[in-house]
Image (cartoon, rainbow, N blue to C red):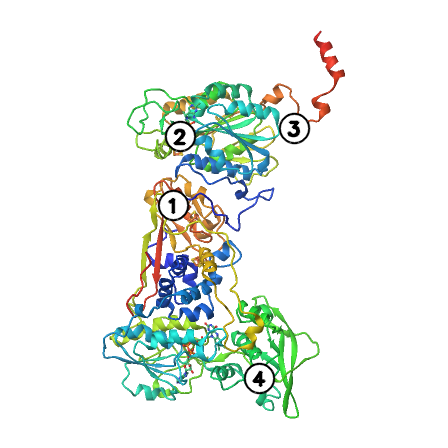
Amino acid sequence: MSYIKPKFRHPRLPTNKLGFTVADYDGAISTLCAGCGHDSISAAIRNACFQSAIPPHRIAKVSGIGCSSKMPTYFLGKSHGFNSVHGRMPSVATGASLANRDLTYIGVSGDGDTASIGMGQFIHLIRRNVNMTYIVANNGCYGLTKGQDSATADLGSVAKGGAVNPFDGIDLAALALLQGASFVARSFSGDKGQLEPLIRAAMAHKGFAFIDVVSPCVTFNNHVGSTKSYAETREHLDAMPLDFVPMREEITTQYAEGTTQAVTLHDGSAIHLKKADATYKANDRRAAMDVVQQAHADGRILTGLLYLDPDSQDLNQNLNLATRPLNELGKDELCPGSKVLKSINEGLR
Amino acid sequence: MKPTDIQDPEYFHKVVDCQFACPAHTPVPEYIRLIAQERYTDAYMINWESNVFPGVLGRTCDRPCEPACRRGRVEEEPVAICRLKRVAADFKDDVKGLLPGAGPKNGKKVALIGGGPASLTVARDLAPLGYELHLYDEHAKAGGFMRSQIPAFRLPDEVLDEEVGYVLDMGVHTHFNKYVDSLQSILDQDYDAIFVGCGAPRGRDLPNLPGRKEADKNIHIGIDWLSSVAFEHTKSIGKRVIVLGGGNTAMDCCRTSRRLGGEDVKVIVRSPFEDMKASPWEKEDAIHEGIPILDNHVPKEFVVKDGKLVGMKFEKVEAQYDAEGKRSLVPTGEDLVYVECDDVLIAIGQENAFPWIEKSTGVRFTSWGTPIINDDETFQSTNKRVFFGGDSAFGPANIITAVAHGHKAAVSIDMYCNGQNPEVNRPAPHVTLVSQKMGIHEWSYDSIPVIDKREAVPLVALEEALKSKTLEVELGFDVETAFVQAERCLNCDAQTVFTDSACIECDACTDICPTSCISFVENAEEPELRQSLLVPAENAEQDLYVSGELATGKVMVKDEDVCLHCGLCAERCPTAAWDMQKFYYTMAKAAPVLVEAAE
Ligand SMILES: Cc1cc2nc3c(=O)[nH]c(=O)nc-3n(C[C@H](O)[C@H](O)[C@H](O)COP(=O)(O)OP(=O)(O)OC[C@H]3O[C@@H](n4cnc5c(N)ncnc54)[C@H](O)[C@@H]3O)c2cc1C
Ligand SMILES: Cc1ncc(C[n+]2csc(CCOP(=O)(O)OP(=O)(O)O)c2C)c(N)n1
Ligand code: SF4
Ligand code: SF4
Ligand code: SF4
Ligand SMILES: [Mg+2]
């Protein structure tokens, strides 16, 4: 087993606007099982941050517990990070985002970490519209504790030991839609072509951006009978191809008329939905819920951007909080003096 | 693109850049690993089978492998392949017991004209098969230019004697001090085949330069002079020496002059410094010994005073390149430059000369004076009984090329003597491909590359070196340095072998590959495909490894260019679709395979 990644990189690696190569966004070598879908998601996050030219030190990674929650070690080695306790990443993320609104927050969680122990916290992140990207690496099981069914395991899916799951799985994307999330998407770890632009869009979105990513557990949930194996996912995949075009950048790809729809984000960047027909409306929550339900009924794993509210108000705006990070405020701003205190007190009399 | 045919041994052969570039296709990474394991004798034998003169070549090889070495594409400097070869030779045990002897007589007789590396290689390959071999050389000892030209301070006599001895001890009949002045006389004897390995023995002159005749006493042809130094006919030279020419001969002439009494020795060359034919390291060695190199100076006149050479005049030129990159040397118009001197050595190239090959032999020549040979595989001349190789075949080259020719010519001679046509059904190279997996995530070799830099070989102190004509300048690596230098090798023979049917397209290999070699993309024609990879494959000399169509309709494409052979793709692959397999390749030889890939 190799514990270090060689230092050499391709001598002609492209650079982004900051002059960094993708290698500048690398983390430590992964200790996850060979072939784990989570490693692909790590690579997609790394690539997305590189492509969007976000300075690594302006990113904070937050996670809970699980194989999926270990992922932040394996990308963005030069960014901030907080590996919290099981299911409690939302509290940490909420606090951090309130304290420093200028960082880009990437939350990485698992189906266990989110849909079981963390459900209570997760739902409030949505409700509060905390400005962050929240990725669930969804493998339908508790990988780290050896593959027990999780709450997202599909009804009828067969566990590695042969037990058939008697419960309906929680559809986290449907739940997020219902609870009013301002950005909801679904993807597949094996489809970086779609996942990378989605992550870029999620990071550009102001508010809570949720991506449910099917991410096969090769060790415990990749057998025949599992509904979240590589083969089964590919078999039922109904992927919406898309591009992300950052603010002020020209669209370089040419699309035939009527085959694409652009969804513009608050900052002017855009998501181009290729092959989307004219009836598709990314900003219609009810329609999105319908589409998701329909796909579920058809046995299709519908991936792509499901819903986006470009005018979303994030938690900081909503509570009318300081417009600058707390660590940038000086003594006078933090402690405005007895005169101000007096006037506040007067106002409460 | 069509899926890559990895059954064709040439595909993986090309991936091992150094071995592919080596004319004799020495299994470089194999012997370098053995050096790291302190198995010097095994490392020596791997070399000996391929290149016959590991000790000689470890000091003198032109090393075409090093510019080709993959390491030079991922960091500044290639692996010290050549000087590691010397380590194997320096630290080996007695190998005599491991060498093949003469085989039981097969009743066939072969004459070898010239005792250089080409003839000696033919002898080495044919002796175990029972051929009666007769080697002719005009000098008292075998070795050819390795003895007469390469100065002892670069190649000690003992080293040469040892390795020439290994060949001659296989029962070769030697005819020394015998200049063959008629090929016909040899043909008239009962030889079944004749190999001509007489080299390219004529040094070029400047016969028409004014003053050439008058100053003749102090003007010497480089190769003749080196040879007379080697055989101790010449023991001194004037204090001020001009060496004309920019090739390896010029470098040996100037450094030898410094040891024979030359104090003010200059190399003066027509071309720009960068274009000089000498290897960069030879130029460095000369400069290190206090020898200036004056480039862009075209010789115009030998200046003679009172019947004696006193200096030379040169015209200053400038290199200009036309649209096709063709160079012309254009005079700058400045005054001629005058350089004083006592002696001049002319080292401006060599030519083939076959005054001893008569028309009646049926051996015909090209307009450049080289023999007509049907191709560079058979080395058979227009007289089917006569074969050429080494410098005699295509003009001056180097030792390792002569060895490679020797191997091929020996195959041809053996086929010819057995009534076969050497042009068809030549034997295939010897190839094995074996998985290096030792455990779930373990390989039999040190897979993760080290970051140590290349180190130069230590030298004896300059003053000491210049005092002696025979004291070897290079000290060689000690075992500690050799280990570090050996570990720099990327093990390019540990091939990444891909099995399409096992791949589940999880992307693990793409994600982990440190040098972004692997992409899963839509198939296309090669130029398009090269552009569509994670990092475009711009080095067209390096192949793409393309799989068949996978489940999603994509193909796996690996750009071989900067693969580190680190094995991480195979480590991260959940289905063992990738495996690291050691590719062992040796070129076809007349003699049976002597050394197999190491365990
Ligand atoms: C100054 C100098 C330095 C060199 N340094 C290097 C180096 O560092 N590394 C390297 O790889 N190469 C070097 N070379 C080139 C290398 O020596 C030759 O390419 C190589 O030796 C050619 O081998 P060969 O077997 O073809 O012939 P040669 O080595 O030339 O041997 C031919 C032999 O045949 C003899 N001979 C010729 N005609 C007859 C005849 N009619 N009858 C009997 N004997 C005959 C010759 O005297 C000679 O001994 C150098 C060459 C020169 C001139
Ligand atoms: C408070 C607490 N309860 C239980 C556990 C045991 N535990 C560790 S990881 C895990 C489930 C992880 O599942 P998931 O989030 O889906 O991650 P995966 O490993 O599948 O990626 C559990 C229950 C724990 N670490 N802490
Ligand atoms: S147990 Fe499953 S989820 Fe965890 S690292 Fe292994 S494959 Fe990935
Ligand atoms: S790294 Fe080693 S195997 Fe690869 S080309 Fe260089 S010497 Fe040869
Ligand atoms: S061995 Fe595999 S992982 Fe390593 S550099 Fe080569 S292709 Fe990449
Ligand atoms: Mg899970």
Q: Is residue A257 left or right of residue B500?
A: right
**Residue A315 position within the rendered picture, expressed as x and y whole percent measured from the top left:** 59, 21
Whether ligand 5 has any atom under 8 Å from the Cβ at mark 1 is answered as: yes
Callout 1: SS = helix
**Residue B495 position within the rendered picture, expressed as x and y whole percent measured from the top left:** 38, 53
Q: Badge 2: how crowded within 10 Å, few (<14), some, or many (20+)?
A: some
Residue depth check, mark 3 versus mark 4: number of the one nearer the observer: 4
Callout 2: SS = loop
Which amino acid, mark 4?
Ile
Q: Is residue A255 above or below residue B409?
A: above
What residue would you read off at disc 4? B237
Q: Residue at image x 41%, y 35%?
A: A37
Tell me whether the residue at label 3 lies in contact with that at label 4, contact meaning CB atoms closer than 8 angstroms: no
Determine the quadrant in which ligand 4 lies. bottom left
Residue depth check, mark 3 versus mark 1: number of the one nearer the observer: 3
Q: Is residue B179 left or right of residue B334?
A: left
Callout 4: SS = loop
Marks 2 and 4 sit apart, C-alpha to C-alpha, by: 81 Å
Marks 4 and 1 sit apart, C-alpha to C-alpha, by: 62 Å
Marks 1 and 2 sit apart, C-alpha to C-alpha, by: 23 Å
What residue would you read off at disc 1? B570
**Residue B527 position within the rendered picture, expressed as x and y whole percent measured from the top left:** 46, 52
**Residue B30 position within the rendered picture, expressed as x and y whole percent measured from the top left:** 38, 59
Whether ligand 2 has any atom under 8 Å from the Cβ at mark 2 is answered as: yes
Please tell me in which quadrant of the rendered image residue B103 appears.
bottom left
Marks 3 and 4 sit apart, C-alpha to C-alpha, by: 80 Å
Q: Is residue B394 above or below residue B515?
A: below
What residue would you read off at disc 3? A327
Tell me whether the residue at label 1 lies in contact with that at label 2, contact meaning CB atoms closer than 8 angstroms: no
